[in-house]
Amino acid sequence: MTSHESSKFIGRSMARREDRYLLRGQGQYVDDIAEPAGTLHLAFVMSPHAHARIVSIDTSEALRVPGVVAVLTGEDFASLVAPIRADIEMPTYKHTDRDVLAREKVRFVGEQVAVVLAENKYAAQDAIELVYVDYDILPAVVALEDARRPDAPLVHDHIDNNIIFQGEFSTPDFAEKHAGSKFVIREKIRHGRLAGVPMEPRGCLAVPDRGDSLVFYTATQIPHIVRTGLATHLGLEESCIRVVVPEVGGGFGTKAQLYPEELIAAALCMKHRRPIKWVQDRREELLTNIHARDHLYDLEIGFDANGIVTSLKLEFATNAGAYSSYPFGATLETTGGARMIIGPYKIQNYAYKNYCLTTHTGPAGVYRGVAQPSCFLAIEALMDRIGRKLGIDPLEVRLRNVVTPSDMPWTNVLGVRYDTGDYPACLKRAREVSGYDNFRRAQRADRLETGKYRGIGISNMTEITGTGAPGWRVRGLRSVSGVDSATLRIDPTGKVTVYVSHASAGQGHLTTFAQIAADYLGARIEDVRVIEGDTGSTPFGTGTFASRSAVTGGGAVICAAQKVGDKIRRIAADMLQADAQDISLCEGKAVVAHDPGRFASFQDVAEIAYSIGNGVLPEGEEFGLEASEFYDPPVVTVANAVHIVEVAVDARDGRVSIENYCIVHDCGRVINPMIVDGQIHGGVAQGIGEVLMEEMVYDENGQLVNASLLDYLLPTAMDVPNLQIHHMESPTIDTTGGFKGVGEGGVIGAVPAVANAIADALSGIGANVNSVPLRPAHLLSLIRNAVREEGRAAIEESAY
Amino acid sequence: MELKREHTIQADQSSVWLALNDDEVLKACIPGCESIERTGENVLRATVRIKVGPIGARFSGVVTLSDIDAPNGYRLTFEGQGGAAGFAKGEARVDLRAEDAEVTVLMYETRAQVGGKLAQIGSRLIESVAVKISGEFFESFSKLVGKECVSDVSEPRAAS
């Protein structure tokens, strides 16, 4: 389309339209929606035990609390809601049906065992304290490392050895090739369990609508999947459900699930025909939202004397917690870590075994980056170890192993296609802008300077983005469509509304999709409005997670804009007595090429399309001026980045400060650089938290001991340094629009870079850093042990 | 959570031992104790109100005494339910040693486990709360036993 070649809006840092109202405090989140008269409130009784048989539940005292309408248990819901089950088609996969309220047994601390329905939330909260549950406590298995032990208690009777599923893969003759590697390094990399912690907790408001219908307001990233999930689990006609997503205060994957509370609220709304509201508190959020990243990588990497990787062997286990979730099951971390670890490298001999293990802990799911922060933590740790072993600079080791532009399009051994990108140039640019070589030249062998160990870390990562239907089928997810869609409609006044199947949780979709639509339609951007997150008005689609909206939604918007644009051209050509191919669309007008005085405005065209006034549609043309298009990217798009980080580890107290942070990022064609930078900022902040402080801690009995933000530490502005961000743009050639996703790249890049910088800082004293989080107490013990082993004097003396 | 402490009480060992087995003394000394009753030989049922940071709850539970070696010590196991606040259970070994005729050293070693809300948002505070509660207990206990030991002094000796 000649008229679209010069982007007018795409590529510009346009101010976010959302901020006009969000920054004024005018955003309407679930809890801000005015409660309709007669709203009932929910509160949940949660299990204090990790594993126990429910002997009895006494609700009589709770029922006497004034305002309490009902107290219900799992048995009451048995006929109302089907157990939660994700449809997973994978060999060896074992389902873990989850009753929306536990029946017979509880399997993690926080599992809901009863719900109180009350006239107000105070009565509901008071009443849950008066529900008496008699438990017969059973032994629990908590740690990932214990799950497969022969004597481990089973979480589900039908799942032997607590293995939900296992997979394996091997390139031809792997054992032989691996045995032939000149050097082999073996290492275990452990990543601790995290929570997503969006600023806004989860919540929903179910409102009965005309007849037997239901309007369901919920803080979700996947409105269309929630609608289908509600219909199938509640046995409702899908057509009677409208899911509406108000503003969402961060999701990060924790809101890309259909949760028991949502099903319960919807079921009670249908049963009582009264509005039902529930908003969780922070403790519930930390206990019951999906957790993530409880991962163990057992690795062997083979390489030659030049540092070229000749083989990689992985045994990978993830802790899925007590149940798999809807719609992703428990698959994504386990398959993701094993499939994505190859990253930007030309690793031709690869074998993995992966295990998804169930334990008596909170269910795990898809948190920003899913397994990519941990698998790049693993592979990037190995790249550094190769460098240390051979005395080759670790950046050079990476340069020697990356896929180069002349290799592209490159298909890796797992079949993932990399169509564009310049990984060596990205590394070299990061080396230059970060001052990497100067840092290395000045760095002492023992890394110790004025009481601090100083190190520099690199992460060189790819990010699988924009996964469509083929990508989800490969990973066995039946309930995750993969396609997204857009309806673009021009109203009789010539204004444009774009209805997109996605749902923003703060990504700025109202701005970026408008930029795309305006460019591809030739509209004025102020004439374009974007609507999403309402299944009543938006067409079906998969939703916003896994860095996919720009690719799948962007592609759909482009297709719809082009289709409507073609119709505008045909009608305008008829009006202006010109050829349709001579009409270009620009600033809301259809203009005859080389004759700018001859034009019709979109409003003129729309009036004809809607038969307003005396104009007549061209022969064969139908009424209306809109198009609905689905888009399914043929392959995943592969974004990439290099992060280089300098840190100082205080020798006396183990505290880490980040002294310099540079990123070179390539997410293909950039729609809005400011929003891309914002995505990277947020991701890096989460990555810094992931390495330096965050961890969900379960004790050996399965008690979660830090279910508050006093004890679950999050990074603040004090912990996040200024980030120097540079962009490269390698548009994809495989997908419409050239976009690659960027939602997760920040966290994926930050985790290995910060961890490697700490590892580099402590490499001078021989400390082996192979796990995160790296909190001060852990680093201090690494330092003390290392220093003791070397027989050095007390650390304080050597440091000062 | 583990707690290991020693307290010196200004009373002879037999008086201390008797007091340790006296429900009324225990009730008076356990901070927040609302009721205590003996439901069987060596089995006590108690209700105690405890506050751990933001969590306040009434715990009702059972304490069982075992390995009784009068007047030298016993083991007690306890299990208390605090409703929505969670639960606590554990055991303690209590040993008495006569420092001299008028002074007894009480040593105890406790291992306790908490669960539910107590663990989730109170873990950070549990140990300091336990130290505080036991401190208050022994302060009251020392006062009470020190005062009463004069009149009771002959009885335990006669009994033993």
Image (cartoon, grey):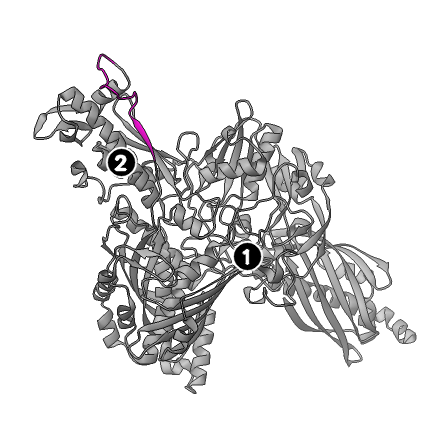
Which residue is nearer to you in this view: A174 or A506? Answer: A174
Q: Quadrant of residue A480?
A: top left
Q: Is residue A430 left or right of residue A788?
A: left
When the figure is inspected, residue A248 is found, relative to residue A656, above or below; the finding is above
Residue at point 67% right, 35% down? A70
Residue at point 65% right, 49% down? B84
| Tag 2 subunit | A
Q: Label 2 is placed on what type of residue?
A: Ala
Q: Name the mark on residue A92.
A: 1
Q: Position of residue A157 (x, y in %)?
A: 66, 56
Residue furthest to the front: A172
Which residue is nearer to you in this view: A376 or A57? Answer: A376
Quadrant the C terminus of chain A occupies: bottom left
Q: Is residue A370 visible?
A: yes
Q: Position of residue A705 (x, y in %)?
A: 57, 59
Q: Label 1 is placed on what type of residue?
A: Thr
> Magenta part mainly helix, strand or loop?
loop
Q: Is residue A69 left or right of residue A486?
A: right
Tell me the residue that label 2 is attached to. Answer: A517
Q: Position of residue A105 (x, y in %)?
A: 67, 51
Span shown in magenta: A613-629
Residue furthest to the left: A594
Q: Position of residue B53 (x, y in %)?
A: 59, 55
Residue furthest to the top: A614
**Secondary structure type for disc 2:** helix
Reply yes or no: does residue A551 show up in magenta. Answer: no
Residue furthest to the right: B158
Reply yes or no: does residue A614 show up in magenta. Answer: yes
